[in-house]
Structure formats: structure tokens, C-alpha cells
């Protein structure tokens, strides 16, 4: 059987691990071929406060995709992260059709608590109105889920209600990253998964006290979830494996006293986490 191929369209940095630099290696380590299209090329992620580089134009992105199409006319999945501009979002949707790809995992990178919306005008509305009609999987964080559904989410039940709104718009599976709800232990962090077929899961792991919070964690999360989805892993197992691997990476990063994620050192945990945290069913809350 041919190796499955992922088209990953998101940001790139020369130093550190965010965007494609955070997503491509885990997918390759899991055994996938990855076609990489970068929406920006910066020296480092913007969390450092200073960086060099440039944002690529929509015409540049389209030109690259046209060139890729000359060599392969089909991919098994499309992964998108930081896009930079709503017009690039439209290019991603067109690529989904051009490459005859059913599986688009859309990470709606646009904002977070403490930062609010940090992308260009038009992009949040693209995710909220257009991407939800075409993406098979979406991986918003807590803040982004609230924005896309106009809800205040304080409990797992609130989150499931918000997920149902996105299901009704067309998204089959939603993974809520960095989910914190009323009453949960302050030293814990959760991820919630909801499938249109009625599967609902919550996994909780220790909150590793990384300061500042690590950039690129969401990009790794989306990549791992996509990798497990492509190999047919059930949703609850994919959620458990992803959350456990992230906890391993965070723990090693913290123990090393470094800011960039310890992806190279912890690459084996992408396939076999050192410690498993298992997702619990939330079906009784649906």
C-alpha cells in the first residue's frame, strides 16, 4: 500500500517549532509523506517580540500549489494552520477540490485568551462562515470555539452545545484544545472531542507550568490528531494518544528549561507516549 500523503499549508520559521516546523516532523515520524506549503517565512515565531522575514502573497501560495499539482493530482489529507489572510483560506478550499481530497483538518488559528484576535480582518469570519462548511475536522482552542459559535463556554456541556452548532454547519469532528472549564483542578488541562455521530470524549492531563506558554503546541496537536485519524484510530484513542504525547513533550521541555518544544528528543512519544492519559466518554452529557 502506498504511503499516505498530507498537504500541509501553514506558517514556517527558521528557528524553533511552530506552524509547519511543528507539524511536519511529527507526521513524518508517524510514517506520512508531507507536502509543505509555507504561508509565511519568519526567522522565529512572533512570540519573541522581534523577527525578520515575510508573509507570502496569495498568488505565491497558488503558484506553489499549481506546481505541486503537476507532480501529484491527489493527496489523502490537507492540514491548514496559520493562513495570514482570508484569500489564502479560499485557496485552501480550492485545493481541497483540485486535489480531490475529502479530509481537510482546519486549525482555525485566530486568537486566544489574553491575546484576543491576532490575525488580519476577514480571516476570523472566513473560519466562522466558510471553513465550517468544508472542513471535515476542526481543532479550535477554547477561545476560538467561543468566537465561532457566539457562546460563552464554561462547562463540558457548554462545549458540546457549541460543537453541535458546528456539526450542524458541516464539521464532522471537533477537537477543542486547551480547554479549561469551571470546577476543574487548576493544575490540569483538558481536550474535548465531539463527533457528529454522537461520540463525545474528554481527556485531562497535568498542566505543565511552562512560562511563557509554548508556541506551536496547537500545531503539534493538530498534526498528531490527523496522523491518528489517517491510520484509522478511533476518536477516543486518537484523543488519548495525542494528549498523552503532548504532555510528554511539555514535561521534557519544562525539565530542560527551554522555550522551544522538545520535539526531536521526544519523537518516540508521537507513536508511543511514555505515560497514557485516557479519554472518558461524555455521552451522558450530550
Image (spheres, rainbow, N blue to C red):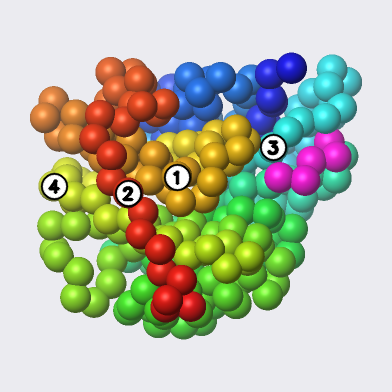
Q: CA distance from mark 3 to mark 2?
A: 26 Å
Q: Which residue is mark 1?
A: 237
Residue 177 percent across, percent down from the top left: 40, 56
- Is residue 54 shown to the viewer in this render? no
Q: Nearer the viewer, mark 2 or mark 4?
A: 2
Residue at image x 79%, y 23%? 68
Residue at image x 85%, y 40%? 100
Residue 141 bears which disc, if any?
Answer: none
Name the N-terminal-most of marks 1 and 2. Answer: 1
Tell me: residue 205, above or below residue 44: below
Residue at image x 24%, y 50%? 205
How crowded pointer 4 is (Cα within 10 Å; few <14, some 14-19, many 20+) is rated as few
Q: Overall secondary structure of the magenta stretch? A: loop
Q: Find numbered disc 4 in the image and state the secondary structure of the residue it sits on.
A: loop
Name the N-terminal-most of marks 2 and 4. Answer: 4
Part of the protein shown in magenta: 99-103
Q: Nearer the viewer, residue 209 or 235?
A: 235
Q: Nearer the viewer, mark 3 or mark 2?
A: 2
Quarter of the view holding residue 245: top left
- Is residue 251 shown to the viewer in this render? yes
Q: Which residue is mark 4?
A: 209
Position of 171 with respect to 66 (left or right) is: left
Q: Which residue is mark 3?
A: 77
Residue 91 percent across, percent down from the top left: 77, 46
Residue 100 shown in magenta: yes
Q: CA distance from mark 2 to mark 4?
A: 21 Å
Tell me: residue 244, above or below residue 261: below
Amino acid at each position: 500500500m502506498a504511503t499516505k500523503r498530507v498537504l500541509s499549508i501553514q506558517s514556517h520559521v527558521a528557528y524553533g517549532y511552530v506552524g509547519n516546523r511543528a507539524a511536519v516532523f511529527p507526521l513524518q515520524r508517524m510514517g506520512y509523506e508531507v507536502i509543505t506549503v509555507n504561508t509565511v517565512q519568519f526567522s522565529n515565531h512572533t512570540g519573541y517580540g522581534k523577527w525578520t522575514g515575510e508573509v507570502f502573497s496569495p498568488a505565491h501560495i497558488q503558484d506553489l500549489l499549481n506546481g505541486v499539482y503537476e507532480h501529484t493530482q491527489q493527496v489523502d489529507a490537507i492540514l491548514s494552520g496559520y493562513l495570514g489572510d482570508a484569500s489564502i483560506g479560499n485557496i485552501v478550499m480550492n485545493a481541497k477540490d483540485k486535489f480531490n481530497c475529502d479530509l481537510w483538518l482546519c486549525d482555525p488559528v485566530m486568537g486566544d485568551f489574553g491575546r484576543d484576535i491576532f490575525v488580519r480582518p476577514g480571516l476570523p469570519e472566513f473560519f466562522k462562515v466558510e471553513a465550517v462548511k468544508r472542513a471535515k475536522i476542526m481543532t479550535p482552542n477554547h477561545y476560538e470555539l467561543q468566537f465561532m459559535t457566539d457562546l460563552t463556554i464554561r462547562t463540558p456541556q457548554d462545549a458540546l452545545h457549541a460543537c453541535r452548532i458546528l456539526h450542524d454547519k458541516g464539521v464532522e469532528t471537533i477537537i477543542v484544545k486547551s480547554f479549561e472549564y469551571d470546577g476543574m483542578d487548576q493544575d490540569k488541562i483538558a481536550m474535548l472531542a465531539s463527533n457528529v455521530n454522537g461520540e463525545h470524549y474528554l481527556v485531562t492531563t497535568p498542566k505543565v507550568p511552562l512560562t511563557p506558554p509554548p508556541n506551536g503546541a496547537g500545531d503539534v496537536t493538530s498534526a498528531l490528531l490527523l496522523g491518528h485519524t489517517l491510520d484509522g484510530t478511533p476518536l477516543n484513542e486518537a484523543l488519548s494518544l495525542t494528549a498523552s504525547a503532548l504532555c510528554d513533550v511539555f514535561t521534557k521541555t519544562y525539565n530542560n528549561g527551554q522555550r522551544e518544544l522538545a520535539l526531536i528528543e521526544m519523537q518516540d512519544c508521537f507513536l508511543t507516549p511514555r505515560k497514557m492519559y485516557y479519554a472518558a466518554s461524555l455521552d451522558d452529557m450530550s
